[in-house]
Amino acid sequence: MAVYKRTYQGYDGRLTPAWSRFLIIARYAFQRLFDSKFLIAFFVASFVWPAICAVIIYFPHNSGAIALLHPSVREMIPIDGRFFLRYMVWQGSLAFLLAACVSPGLISTDLRNNALPLYLCRPFSRAEYVLGKMSVLAILLSSITWVPGLLLFALEASLEGTAWLWANLWIATGIFLGSWIWILVLCLLGLALSAWVKWKLAAGALLFGVFFVAAGFGAAINNTMHTDSGSLINLVELIGAIWAGLFRVKARTGISVESAWVMVIAICLCCLLLLARKVRAYEVVRS
Amino acid sequence: MTATLDDRIVFEDVSKFYGEVLGVNQVHLSIPPGITTLVGPNGSGKTTLMNLMTGLVRPSRGRVSVLGIPPGQPERLFRIAGYCTQFDAFPRALTGYQFLYSFLRVHGMGDLQAHQFSFKALERVGMVEAAHRRIAAYSKGMRQRIKLAQAISHQPAVLVLDEPLNGLDPMARAETIALFRVLAREGSHVIISSHILHEVDQVSDQVILLSNGYVVAEGQIQAVRGEMHLEHPLQVLVRCNNPSLLASRVFAQDHVAEVKLHSDRLGLLVTTRDPNRFYELVNQMVLEGTIDVESVAPTDDDVHSVYEYLIGNEGGAA
């Protein structure tokens, strides 16, 4: 045994706050994502509807446009909860498609390549890893949902005045909260499926399956059993019920807002459980 | 053995089961600084032992401590530990530099420090020129070196390297082994797993032999071999001017199991259960002037022989 003198110099400099380190994961993920021209085109196209909404909001406040069309142009498309709900439904659909493109590759590639030890042999937990991966999706989806939504709300408030702002503050809450619920569901489902099947294409297909097959199955239950309970496995209807509650409009589905909340929370918990089981630094070998 | 030693990696009665599958069982180890190599067939528990050191798996029983730090405290542990897995696991769109830089940021370094430490590590593994090329375009050997760079980039005191020599060409192997020696001289613990037994011999201060999840032997290889002389007598090749005379004297010794004359008639292969007494005899004959000795060298006190004797070809524990 040789005699070794400890002469190495470990790093003892300043450290960045631990809470912020999960964002490092997103750093290069965006670079990789935006290497795809399709994704760039899709992302840009996601702002078309907010731009149209901005025009719709601005139009009734433009004297030239009022003179040209009709003074009652303001009543043609009222800017209220229903207007913003329509905005949310459209942007939410785009958010789903974007999540279906992006989420399958986020965790599956790492798991398939046994890359998790690489991340987890740092002062970095599994929760931070998942949070980091989730932040990629959350930032993307936020930029096409609540961020432009709140900008539209601010535009309308600036045109209408403070009274409108205070009277309709619940709409802003609805945009923010409604978007985040949708983002959270998409992130958790996307990541959980990505971790579960470890195959990008299959994870993407499964995400569509969870939404559309479950919706079809739910509709079949509703029709054959003359009940609304089938809607409880239809994620679109669950979110629709919650959004309807937030935007103070009547929901199309028969399920209550409370039961929709309970089901969405249950689905999120199942996704978290799946992530906790699958996102591990090692492969469990079974003989 | 105590878990409070702050310059050792300590395993106290550690077992790890993956459900019904045994990872490692009843491991007691106290690993000092220097280069320690884990040797064993596939499935013997090398990677499990490494994962236990780095907290990537938790022991089913027993305790592990790395320089006094329990692996359950990653914030403290990974300040002093670096791990290089055997898997080719990369975000392949990144360049070598981006790969190191981003993981140093995960370690909590600021922009400037991460930049500096990335280049220091790249320099140590000889990858500065390829720093800004994408990892996807790297050769197998370059990928091994960039993996090694990420493990040493934050200048850890404990380096855990799973099969770090796989895929390296002879030159890169020699450079990498030299780097391990430098790191060990600086007082680091360098824990390596390897299948390449002759390189284990070159590089290791001590070895840990594993088979079927059990530690079969540990320590300096000559010391381990020394404990096996009764079951597996040592073979010593003596090259001298009069091997026949030496053979006749050696035959009279009760510790000698076998004597073979080399085909060129200038060497004698002696199998002995007590090498010290044999060496004394050779010394005595040299002093008497009855033989001129050119060399005396054990032929089976290397890792390969110990591995063969203890583990064998089938990978079963002796």
Image (spheres, rainbow, N blue to C red):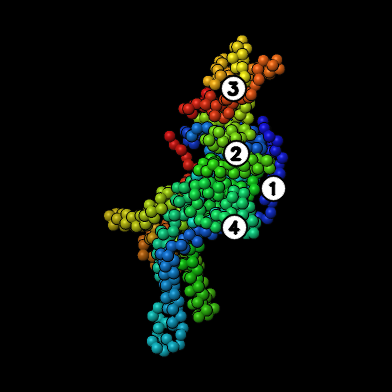
Tag on residue A82? none
Residue in the picture at 46% in, 67% down: A144
Residue in the picture at 50% in, 71% down: A150
Same chain assignment for discs 1 and 3: no
The disc, 1 or 4, on the residue closer to the chain's N-terminal end is 1
Answer above or below: position of B160 versus A18.
Answer: above
Q: Which chain does the numbered disc 4 sit on?
A: A
Alpha carbon of mark 3 to alpha carbon of mark 4: how far? 63 Å
Secondary structure of the residue carrying tag 3 is strand
Tell me the kind of residue under disc 2: Ile
Residue wearing tag 4: A20
Figure disc tally:
4
Q: Position of residue A241 (x, y in %)?
A: 41, 62
Residue wearing tag 2: B191
Residue wearing tag 3: B237
Residue in the picture at 70% in, 38% down: A4
Q: Would residue B141 be found to the left or right of residue B191 on screen?
A: left
Q: Which chain does the numbered disc 1 sit on?
A: A
Tell me the kind of residue under disc 1: Gln
